[in-house]
Structures are given as C-alpha cells and as structure tokens.
Amino acid sequence: MSVALRNAQRAVPVRRAPLRRAVCALRSALGASRFDVGLVCASNALMQRLNGVYRHCPEPTDVLSFPFHQVEAGELPRPCCRGEYNLGDIFLGVEYIHQLCRETGEDFDDVLTVTAAHGLCHLLGYRHDTKPEWEQMYQKEVQILEQLNRLTGSRLRPLTAGLF
C-alpha cells in the first residue's frame, strides 16, 4: 500500500523521496506495510491550529497523529474491507522541527525521520502518558529505528529518551 506525502508548507525545504522511503521501511518494520499512511509536512500555523483543536494546546508542536483505527499498543488493525487498510495521518511540524534542529545542531532529515517513527507508533496505539506506556513506546521506536539503521547505515535513536 502507499505512503501519501503532502508538503503543506513553504518555509522549510523537505526532501520528500527519502522521507517517504524511510516511512515505508518503518511501516514495514511495524508489520503494517499493507496499510496506507498519510504524511503531511505542516507549518507552525497549521500545527498550532490542529494542536489547539485536538489537544487544547494552541502551540506549534513536532508531530500529531490521527489514527484511522483505535487499537491497543502493538496491535495491527483488522480491516473489514479494502477501504479500511489505512493507519491514519501523521502531521509533521517541519518548521518546529527545523527550529529545534537549528538550536541543537541535530540533522534535520534524521530528526524528521525519527519524528515520523514516533507518529507511526502513535497510529498503532502506542502512547506515552505514563512511564510504563512510555517505556513500551520507546522500546518499539528503538526496534523499528534499529531495523531502519541496518537498511540505511544510519544511527537514528528515539527522541523521547528523557521523557520520564
């Protein structure tokens, strides 16, 4: 199935093909390659608006995930028909991420990929509201990023290392 990527902002150049390839590999590492995923590269203004509406926190953020199915962490959806082979949509706050990378000196493309991995985990029911949930999600992110690293020679790690 496909990864539909849309760049809905103009402030930061996004290398779409490598990002799409990475998300395809991450989706495969999660065992969900037969499911579609929507990926939107969003401006701070859009992220602020979405974050305000859906999380009641009207500030820009790095990632928002909107799952098509409600599943427990680590479960794959059980679609009833062809139109339900969809994990959902991930909005990447590329302006926000770019600003953070400028401040920390981290590689923008790497952080974008790791943030997409985090969003994919959210689409599959992973959360980080409590320490046990965070530990479970963190371990899944480590697992799928290690698989991507083996394919690409990268050294990507989850961004949420110090959350709890």
Image: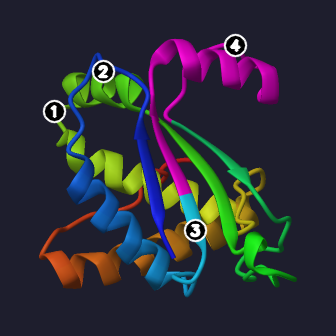
Q: Name the residue under label 3.
A: 36
- Which three-letter amino acid code belongs to the residue tagged 4? Pro
Residue 98 appears in the figure: yes
The answer to the question of whether label 3 and label 2 lie on touching residues, with beta carbons closer than 8 A, is no
Q: Which residue is drawn at 79% across and 21% down?
A: 53
Q: Which of marks 3 and 2 is nearer the N terminus?
A: 3
Q: Can residue 164 be seen in this view?
A: no
Mark before the other along the chain sequence, 1 or 3: 3
* Structural distance between the alpha carbons of marks 1 and 4: 26 Å
Callout 4 environment at 10 Å: few (<14), some (14 to 19), or many (20+)? some
Q: Which amino acid does label 2 sit on?
A: Gln
Disc nearer the start of the sequence (4/3): 3
Work out whether mark 2 precedes mark 1 in sequence or the reverse, and give the earlier one: 2
User: From mark 4 to mark 3, how far is it between C-alphas?
Assistant: 29 Å
**Crowding at label 3, few (<14), some or many (≥20) Cα neighbours within 10 Å?**
many
Q: Which residue is drawn at 21% across and 58% down?
A: 18
The answer to whether mark 1 and mark 4 are in CB contact below 8 A is no
Q: Disc 2 and disc 1: Cα gap in Å? A: 10 Å
Residue labelled with disc 4: 58
Instruction: Specify whether 28 is left or right of 84.
Output: left
Q: Horizontal and vertical percent for residue 68?
A: 77, 59
Q: Distance between the residues labelled 3 and 2?
A: 29 Å
Magenta range is 38-62
Q: Name the residue under label 2.
A: 99
The type of residue carrying mark 3 is: Asp
Secondary structure under the numbered disc 4 in the rendered image:
loop
Residue 58 magenta-highlighted = yes
Q: Are marks 2 and 4 in contact (CB under 8 Å)?
A: no
User: 115 above or below 33?
Assistant: above
